[in-house]
Image: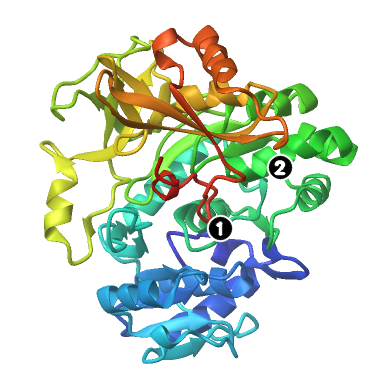
Amino acid sequence: MSLLFPALAHDPDRPALRFGDRSLTYGELASAAGALAARLDGASRAAVWATPTLETAVGVVAALLAGVPAVPLNPKSGGGELAHIVADSAPDVVLAAPGTELPDALGDLRFVGIDVDASGPTREWPEPDASAPAFVVYTSGTTGPPKGAVLPRRAVTSTLDALQDAWEWTGDDVLVHGLPLFHVHGLILGILGPLRRGGSVRHLGRFSTEGVARELGSGATMLFGVPTMYHRIAEALPAEPELVKALSGARLLVSGSAALPVHDHERIAAATGRRVIERYGMTETLMNTSVRADGEARAGTVGVPLPGVSVRLVEDDGVTEIPAGDPEAVGEIQVRGPNLFTEYLNRPDATAGAFADGGWFRTGDMAVRDPDGYVRIVGRKATDLIKSGGYKIGAGEIENALLEHPGVSEAAVTGEPDDDLGERIVAWIVPADAEQPPAADELASHVADRLAPHKRPRVVRYLEALPRNDMGKIMKRALPRG
């Protein structure tokens, strides 16, 4: 039936997808996706209105069966962004649940309703070449209009199979998560990952600690989340014994899309005896590294390179490689492997600029590497690398230190120009008690005692909340100017 999803043909009665009280077996999924795939014959691309529903999962599987690249659309995107994506990707159709009212930006596309109860004759679908595009996923567009990263089918299969190895992921696993389905984390890892293994996924629809406790307490074995979700879990654990019990029995707890603060790592581990493992990926690369299921879940690291993926750190010149082992040797991460995207759609200039000689993709992420190969990300080159007093300093480790202070609820660190230091370190703090925020000199001393004096914040600014995107990442460019 499908080389991507062999279980569609071999395990028809096995549970595949569950969203709330709606579910499909593999046989039902094969029927619904097969019927929809037949309606996509001849399409060049298919936009998918990516709500957290059965319809989105069926629509994406159908597009993959038909060999039609899927363009996931964020339902929360504004009209201007949607219009740009539609004009740039030029889909022939838009897939959504019947009766969905779509925004005007999608009005000229042929609407194809996704019937999750549809059935049709079973047929063999020819498998496209591994280099054929599977998805066009749009980046967040923080430095300009969103770019469409073209992900080939080999990137999907190589990443999911590498994670099978790293996480000992099998068809017996039941994954629970509440991630959005317009992003690679929730869609490719969180939906296609279980389907490729022949396992099942239970989507929460909307994340809640009660939902996590219910699903992990009733047979689910794995949890995917972003740091915001794990922070809420850590906060809830003292008052929710059922959540403690459920997490304690999980086989694997995985966090991604942003760094999980060490403080939350430790609180979850202390309460449940289970350590959260982190992995590192991007829209353009899918997954690059991960802590392995049989390895040490070392807080503050994203593990080691996945099978088939090469990772190196380079100096500012983009070429000179930095050897592993020096905890102060910060370099940009470059990756190479079958997990990479092939191009930015319609952007040959951006595509060429994204790669160094030898096919190395410039991630823009800065990291150090432990002697045993574990990677520690310190932040984005554009927003998280601070050059102060001759030192290259990563914002991430300072943020982790600040979050260890009992008076700090949230923290972000940036740099700003300084005549003497080049850049000075600025801490943006959401205090645990707005009436009695910790003093700036107290926070500076707290950081200096844990890290080094040159890493202490020189300026502290207080906020009611930090700006975050849909995946829980702090949007530092949206912080108010000092």
Q: Is residue 99 above or below residue 23?
A: below
Query: Label 2: which residue?
Result: 232
The residue lying toward the viewer, choosing from 368 and 29, is 368
Q: Amino acid at mark 2?
A: Arg
Horizontal relation, residue 340 to residue 251: left or right: left
Which of pointers 1 and 2 lies earlier in the amino acid sequence? 1
Instruction: Give the side of residue 149 with respect to residue 352, left or right.
Output: right
**Is 101 in front, or is 29?**
101
Q: Mark 1 near mark 2, Cβ–Cβ under 8 Å?
A: no
At horizontal 78% and vertical 69% (from top left) the residue drawn is 21
Residue 434 visible in rendering: yes
Residue appearing at x 60%, y 72% in the figure: 29
Q: Secondary structure at mark 2?
A: helix
**Badge 1 density bin: few <14, some 14–19, many ≥20, Cα 10 Å:** many
Residue 30 placement: quadrant: bottom right
Residue for badge 1: 191
* Helix, strand or loop for disc 1: helix
Image quarter of residue 321: top left
Residue under the point 57% across and 24% down: 402
Viewer-closest of 307 and 244: 244
